[in-house]
Amino acid sequence: MIDFELNTQQRMLKEALHDMGKNVIRPQSLGWDRQKSIDLDFLRNFYMMSQALRGENNPMEDFNEGPKNRDPNKPVQTNRTAAVGAEELAWADASIMLSLPGPGLGGPPVRATGTPEQKERFFSIFRDMTAELRWGAYGLTEPGAGSDVAAIRTTCRRDGDHYILNGRKCYITMGGRASWVVIFATIDPALGRAGHRAFVVEKGTPGFFVGKIEEKMGLRANETAELVLEDCKVSAMNLLGGEEKYQTKEGFMTAMKTFDNTRPLVAAMACGIGRAAYEYARDFVKENYVLGRPIPRYSAIAERLARMNRQLEAARMLTWKAVWMADQHLPNAKEASMSKALAGQAAIAACIEAIEICGAHGSLTEDHALLEKWFRDIKVYDIFEGTGQIQRIVISKRLLSDLKAF
Amino acid sequence: MISFEPTEDQKLIAGTVADFAKSSLTPRAREFEKAQAVASETRRAAHEMGLSMAAVPEAFGGQGLGLSTAVMVNEELAYGDPAAPFGLPGFGSYLLAVQELATDEQAKALLAPFADPAGYDTFGAVAWSERKPNRQRAGFATTAKAVPGGFELTGAKAFVGNADLAKSILVFAQVDTEAGWNGLGAFVVAKGNPGLRITGRHKTLGLDCGHFGELSLESAKVAASDRLEGRGDFANACIRFFAKYSLIVAARQVGLARQAFDVAREYCDIRKAFGKPIGHFQAVAFTLADRHMDAESARELVRRAAWAWDAGKDPSQCLLFTAQAVAHAHQVAMRCADDAVQLHGGAGFMRDVIVEKLMRDAKQMALAGATAEQMDQLAAAVELGIPLDPALVLPTTETQAVLT
């Protein structure tokens, strides 16, 4: 039956995150933005709390294999719950979700392609982070190759029991502090995707350096790093999935599959930030405009508010549909891209409109500073994990016949 | 639990309606347009399938399948031919208005003829709009004067769907001339009423097989029992009626948007330029991707609003979801139809291809029930906590006149 009601667990998660967002996170959000990092104490407490909440179907699912003894064909709730949680957390602060301890975006490729030995080795460090918080990261983008993944130039060549990696990775979320990073490299650029290899490169590997920590427009509390590989010597045991994984083209396709489940979560986060801006503008109008009187300005503002909100709702519908499909184990590449493309667009529009509706107040970095922050934070949601244009390529390839490439 | 999966029954019904639309509506869309009517045998077939009364509660002779099923039925009918549902008797403005405004006893009597085997030829109409806003005072110029035993209606109504076919017309008139939009009443006027005259049929931009027309009332006498009072809360009953009717129209816009998208997509696959299908150019492909997102999101918003009504959610939430769905669907349908014409190039402008009709239908349909602009005002009022004053949230002639 068609239903849009959150289940009990999702409702409780949403309410808990909302309360914490309002009372704990938002009051610190601007400080984190200015100091360019989230307090470790907060992250630790948040981590401990999510550990305590962890149960069956928890969004903070076991990093390794997920709940045991689960029938892989049986529908789950995980993706829906994660979307609900991601939206609420982003409503409070956009940077937290991207800064949470754990394998981050590095998790999906390891989970999807890692050998049992690799999964154990790379995930076990996250099992108990009471003493020390740890992160994983995902290194694909390079100065010369972002959306065009096939064009990566970081090289790898076999040297005995090792691979030697050379190149530069950029815009890597939590790259500076990650315990390990999934690095994509090529054995021969001429081979295109067939030449790609994925490695788990650990912190402290000889020849592996953290370069520049980026200064950004928004999401300033979240770390974005450049990573440098100079004759970096990586054990062949860290080749993700082992040699046999790369006899077929699947090796590369794995990288792309990473995104089918994460794109809707990015969309959910965008919905959360857009909603924050929308609610702020709505409450501002309530308090600062003369309502209920036939002033022409009012109906124009009312229409803007309504439009912002319904565009966000439309995006939320596509997001929920994409995660619902993921939970049913239905292929959802098109829907995942649709949700992200629409949510990025709707949330950016909402943040821009919110500033305009509040007038000069909206651009102040003092009284209404959150609004100004959200405006800076949201733009990247139409950029990372595939720009809006890349999403449209993914979508249109699934709409038109025989469209392999433009 | 969030789910996008219709029930087995709904899948079966939607599938059957889709087959019917494909075989009986799509191939004859141009014929209906020219005839300005849906053929009698098509109406009969739809009626025999039970489409007319699907969403009407069982107590009133319907199947009680709710709005959730009604929006699916309307979407599929409109996917076949978006104009056709306006020319089919059944789940349109009249049935909804009676359900919202009448007492159970009145509703039973008024809806019975629609469930009858002869129901395929039975039309009802809602006479709401007037040609011009009333400049003397707020409210309609058409008045209902209390006389012994009932009321006398005098005035003129416009943009009335099925005006010339209706056996029964629900006329909105000013009862209390001092009370503005809070002073309205609704009265059932039978076709044979000596004071009722159908004064003409509008020539419209689109939706040709919907019979939109005008009527005049000259001291048309109705009994006191012909007045529908909205079960004690007339203003809110009117708001609910327009919300639900607009949602049904929005479901038709979703069907239209899907059809426009599919026709355009097929064309972009086969039409070649510069040595390859035009869909293989990014400007074209991205446009299709955007319209696909539009149609899919509109469909889910419409379904969510229908779900909220059926699940008995808080009225303000139902109104908000409905307003969002309707405003989005109207804009989406127009974009989809417009781009479908645009992607066809010159061919899209010619009547050989269906897209030009879809574009006209989409614009016309955006004026049936409450408009996107009116729905945005309603949504904002709910969100800002402003009282739902009928003058603000009903589609009055003072803002935008609408078709009913």
Image (cartoon, coloured by chain):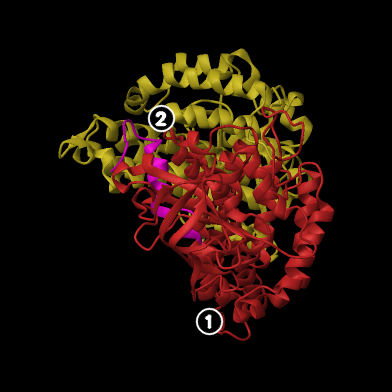
Are the residues under marks 2 and 1 on the same chain? no
- Picture residue at 56% right of the left edge, 45% below the top: A237
Residue identified by numbered label 2:
B209
CA distance separating discs 2 and 1? 52 Å
The shade of chain A is red
B61 or A64: which is nearer to us? A64
Q: Does the stretch in magenta take in A181?
A: no
Q: Nearer the viewer, residue B156 or A77?
A: A77
Q: Position of residue A125 (x, y in %)?
A: 71, 54
Q: Above or below — where is A382 with respect to A263? A: below
**Given the image, on which type of amino acid does mark 2 rest?**
Cys
What chain is tagged by disc 1?
A
* Residue B356 drawn above or below residue A228: above
Q: Quadrant of residue A174?
A: bottom right
Residue drawn at the location 78% of the way across and 30% of the way down: B105
* Among the 4 quarters of the image, the one containing residue A400: top left
Left-right relation of A298 to A404: right
Q: Secondary structure at mark 1?
A: helix
In the image, what residue type sits under mark 1?
A: Ser
Q: Start and end of the magenta stretch?
A: A381-406
Residue A51 x/y as whole percent: 80, 55
> Colour in which chain B is shown?
yellow
Q: Please name the residue that numbered disc 1 is placed on.
A: A363
Residue A313 appears left or right of B161: right
CB-based contact (under 8 Å), mark 2 and mark 1: no
